[in-house]
Image (cartoon, helix red, strand yellow):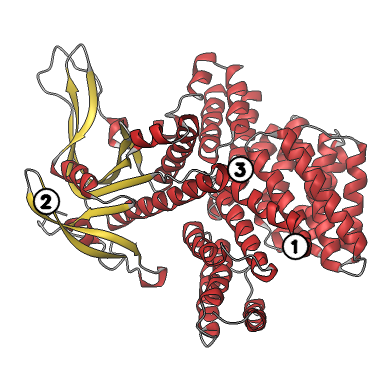
Amino acid sequence: MIKTSQFENEVKKIEDIFQSFDLTDSKKKILDALSQFEKQSAPLPDDPLLSAVLKWYRNLFLQKSGYFPRSEQLLDETLSAFENLTEPVYLRWKLKTFLSLGYVHKAQCNYFDAESYLKDALEIALAEPSLSKFLGEIYSLLSKVNLSLQRYGQAKSYTALEKEVSYENSKANPSDDAAAMIYAHALINFSRTNRLIGFVDQSIQFHLDEAIEICNRLDNENGLLRARLEMCEFQFAMNITGQTMKNTLSLEPVLKRKKMQKERMQAGLLIAKIYKKILDYELAEKKINDIILLAKKHQMASEQIMADALFELGSVYSAMNELPQALKLFRHSAKIGMVLGRKSIILRSFNASWLIDQYKANDLLGSDLVYGDATFVRNRVERKISPFKESRTKVKLFASTMFVDIVNFSSMMLKSDENLTVKMVDELIDRMYLIIYQYGGYIDKFLGDGFMAIFEHGKTIQQKTAFNTIKSAVDILRALKHKNYKLKKNYGVDENINVRIGISTGEIYALLLGNYIKTEFTYLGNSVNLASKLESQAASHYMLIDEDTNLLLKNLIRSTPEQVDIPGLGKTNAHRVIQLARTTERPFNNNRTLPNGKA
């Protein structure tokens, strides 16, 4: 390990290299910039701590590109390098890593782990005076995480602390423009948080006036646009309709020119709300439809802005007495709320639907809402046994089947705090459910301490679907690492939660089993059986895949061969997945043929 003084000098070189790149461009250009960053930083000394710093900077490129799972992996490796170091220079990097983990987990709707890492960052910033400048950013992110968790009191407290410490830091360093801008952003966030909670009064306007003055003085156009947009939102909340419309209409084209897409859509939605308020439903409908198209174009179809747009469009249709269409839109908005883990989105759709149809409103509270409208086989087949038919429902399809089992769960319950263990496992199951959904699969059934998930390919094998199955398993193992870190750090529990994963790809059958007393829809086939057996043979915290899946993805993953003895099948070739191949090394061929000749 190099000396501290050399470490600081080399880090300065890394920072200078990083500052030469623009991370506001397209995803492709940002990834190209990452490759250039790696080339330019390659001559630096080979040192584990410098390598960790480089990973932290690489994570910034990946965050901007939306590759949050890979970013999370790099941050985990960075944290391992700095975790046990206590010198202030290394504590700074430990704090920055915790803070970045907060951002990454929040972006993946994993609010509990985001909060945990942010509190770790807060602990360091409060204990080390030289790192107190990070307090404002930490409080800001904690306020947003708690807002997402509907902890409105805590969100309000954190945003007040953000404003307070940012003001004190700016006051202590009057010539520091960066400190002044941090304070301006704190004022904007203070207004936004209070507005979303439902607390608006005239004092908020004074804060926004101050933020606008700071941004004007420092010629920070992006900050100024955000402050002006928040002022428009505040004015609308205060029922200053005419002034809001005038200001927002002048702001929208500037946001478009600056390519501030989220803010542009927010401004457009505010204009639509004003149209609705003045009963101009046709213009409101057109404006919201434009926003929905824009959200899809910029890969925001599953984000808050889309949920808001769908809800507002539903409200417009409800006002126009087009009730079936309104219910459909409220349902879609609620589904996005479920994926984002935002109860407030679900409840507003429920309340709006309740006024139209109480029975259909109740459907929005169902745990299966997210999958209910999907085109999965299980949603398309007949689920009833008819006395007039001999045949039973049976559909043949290609799929990747995943079995996951929590290892030694019963013994863990005996050795550890039962309530705590259940809480962590519950958080883990929630996280795994979301991961599998995000990769296009679904949990078919829970099996004791584990579950079975299906990733449907359809009539032909799809390489991308098989790869998504592996990626979801990798993310599950990573999520497990965070839960174990939390158990040890926050609760002093030494026992780790571990899982085994088995995956197989091939032809399976979807069918209805049972009789008039009890029926159950399930999946059967050699591929399903093999996935189950591979899971039982996998070691703790590992993933075993079958030969077919490995051949299908040989250029996309890194694996090692293992021969396992499976009852009924004997010696069977399997592969333990080590990691995914790098993004630049992943050639896709989406219509591949399995070794047995089936497509």
Q: Residue furthest front?
A: 415
* x then y, percent, for residue 164: 86, 49
Instruction: Provide the residue designation for mark 1.
Output: 131
Q: Earlier in the sequence, mark 3 or mark 2?
A: 3
Which of the two residues, 96 or 431, is positioned nearer the viewer here? 96
The image's mark for residue 565 is 2
Question: Picture quarter containing residue 414?
Answer: top left
For badge 1, the amino acid type reads Leu
Tell me if 522 is positioned left or right of 31 in this view. left
Q: Residue at x 83, y 55 (%)?
A: 166
Tell me if 28 is positioned left or right of 395 in this view. right
Tell me if 435 is positioned left or right of 64 in this view. left
* x then y, percent, for residue 172: 91, 62
For badge 3, the amino acid type reads Gln
Instruction: Provide the residue designation for mark 3.
Output: 304
Are the residues at dot 3 and dot 1 in contact (C-beta closer than 8 Å)? no
Instruction: Characterize the local packing of mark 3: few (<14), some (14-19) or many (20 or more) Cα atoms within 10 angstroms.
Output: some
Task: Establish if 95 lies above or below 371.
Answer: below
* x then y, percent, for residue 159: 78, 45
